[in-house]
Amino acid sequence: MMSHQISGSMATEALSAQPVFVLGVAHCGSTLLGRMLNMHRSVFFVGELARIDRCLKGHQPCRCGEPLSRCPYWSRFLPEIESRAGYDFRRFSPDLYRRIGELCGKAFIVDTSKTRVYRMARWWVNGGEKYIFLVRDPRGALTSAVSRGNNLKRALRKNKKWTARLDRFVKKQRERGLRVYYEDLATDPESVLRSICRFLGLDFAPEMLRPADKIHHFVSGSVSPYLKDSNEIRLDERWRSALSPDEIKLIERKMTRVEVFRSRYLT
């Protein structure tokens, strides 16, 4: 596999693109992380590409506001995705992501499809892809889920199942896997982004700290208005006032058997 160490003056057009997948549960902060990585000259953040079928059927636009079918940016990629996979994520391959990289001249293609990535990548033989597991305090993630009309107990069961499953998965990836925390990203974004850059073999770019400085073109992703279109990165802990004491106790009791929650959030 070709090295992707990028120096300040090296062009990226000739590099074979490497897929980078962000794993996590709903409302974990993956869209924020994707937008920040997308500010790097060597990265294209595609959003939740494995959900493109739903986006096209539901006429969900590119994040720039244009329908995907009419977005000038995505017009280069849709025919390639359709011809290779028919928009069926189960047919996606590392070669598809590398082809997207060739078309846009980027060295890394970042996909935040989270749980669909897990389902998709289990069918792959090592294609050189890397995985970032973005963990968020479930009390915060579940507050966001409930605010959008989801049932707390149902969302909690899903959060518990996927947090444990994804943690086991990323541990098995060894050097191809990295675990980071939303709370660290929100309170010390430069340190987290530097660690991700080292993991990928990239130079850190200060522009990554200003994700609102450009229009992004990506599929699906969060529509939360929290700090939307702002370069302010601030920890979202609204769960402390939004959840009742009984709801907090329920979440903590159910999640206490999940090692990554217990070791990070209950100590």
Image (cartoon, grey):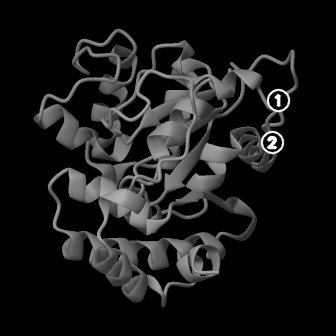
Q: Position of residue 8 (x, y in %)?
A: 87, 20
Determine contact: label 2, label 1, CB under 8 Å.
yes
Q: Estimate how packed mark 1 is, as few (under 14), some (14 to 19) or many (20 or more) residues with alpha carbons within 10 Å.
A: some
Q: Estimate how packed mark 2 is, as few (under 14), some (14 to 19) or many (20 or more) residues with alpha carbons within 10 Å.
A: some
Say how many tags the image has: 2
Residue type (three-letter) at the residue carrying disc 2? Gly
Residue type (three-letter) at the residue carrying disc 1? Ile
Towards the viewer: 62 or 135: 135
* Identity of the residue furthest to the top in this view: 72
Q: Secondary structure at mark 2?
A: loop
Q: Residue 156's quadrant in the figure?
A: bottom left
Quadrant holding the C terminus: bottom right
CA gap, disc 2 and disc 1: 7 Å
Q: Position of residue 226 (x, y in %)?
A: 39, 35
Left or right: 186 with respect to 82?
right
* Identity of the residue furthest to the left in this view: 58
Q: Circle 1 is placed at which residue position? A: 6
Q: Residue at x 49, y 65 (%)?
A: 137
**From what the image shows, is residue 91 above or below residue 255?**
above
Q: Position of residue 63 (x, y in %)?
A: 34, 24
Left or right: 63 with respect to 11?
left
Q: Circle 2 is placed at which residue position? A: 201
Q: Residue 266's quadrant in the figure?
A: bottom right
Q: Which mark is residue 238?
A: none
Towards the viewer: 62 or 147: 147
Give whichever of discs 2 and 1 has the lower sequence position. Answer: 1
Q: Residue at x 71, y 44 (%)?
A: 188
